[in-house]
Amino acid sequence: MRIILIIILCVLTQFGFSQDMNCGKFKTGYFQNIDSKDGNTFIKRTKKYQIETDKSSGVEVKLKIIWINDCSYRLSFIKGNSKWDNEEHVPNNPDLIVEIIETGEDYYIQVAKFQGMNDFKYRSKIKLIK
């Protein structure tokens, strides 16, 4: 009886604490970066491209998106990357590696870093608009 109780508790613990992240629903659509300066950065993501627009400054960045796995993707700058041109610690046209670390019904938390550079990490909350 004691062994059966231990097995049941182990199984319940596995189901109770495992978090099934559904990253697939964030692969395409319209999003808002909640953690940007004033929440004015909007993202349009298709199967091949991501376009980020800062509504307050009018700056638009176009990136190619390649999904590494269900919850990680690579962004390669195509157009509008002048923000990073004058930064000494950033190589020319670096790829960003983005990992989704948490998901909710209409949002996800991401950590982004430049490929090959572990000293820069950007964490933000991205809200699904549609």
Image: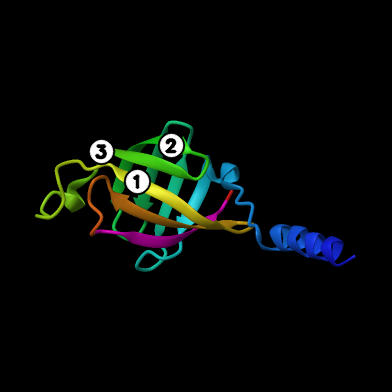
Residue 52 placement, left or right of 45 = left
Contact, mark 3 vs mark 1 (Cβ under 8 Å): no
Q: Secondary structure at mark 3?
A: strand
Q: Secondary structure at mark 2?
A: strand
Q: Crowding near pointer 2: few (<14 within 10 Å), some, many (20+)?
A: few
What residue would you read off at disc 2? 68
Contact, mark 2 vs mark 1 (Cβ under 8 Å): yes
Q: Is residue 23 above or below residue 110?
A: above
Q: Residue at x 43, y 36 (%)?
A: 68
What residue would you read off at disc 3? 79
Q: Residue at x 18, y 48 (%)?
A: 82
Q: For the residue marked with disc 2, what is the amino acid?
A: Ile
Farthest residue to the right: give it.
1
Q: Nearer the viewer, mark 3 or mark 1?
A: 1
Q: Secondary structure at mark 1?
A: strand
Q: Is residue 2 above or below residue 42?
A: below
Main SS class of the magenta portion in the image: strand
How far, Cα to Cα, is label 2 from label 1?
Answer: 9 Å
Q: For the residue marked with disc 1, what is the amino acid?
A: Ile
Q: For the residue marked with disc 3, what is the amino acid?
A: Lys
The answer to whether residue 125 is magenta is yes
* Label disc, if present, on residue 84 of the rendered structure: none
Quadrant, the N terminus: bottom right
Q: Residue at x 30, y 59 (%)?
A: 121
How far, Cα to Cα, is label 3 from label 1?
Answer: 17 Å
The answer to whether residue 85 is magenta is no
What residue would you read off at disc 1? 97
Of mark 2 and mark 1, the one earlier in the sequence is 2
Q: How many numbered discs sit on the rendered protein?
A: 3
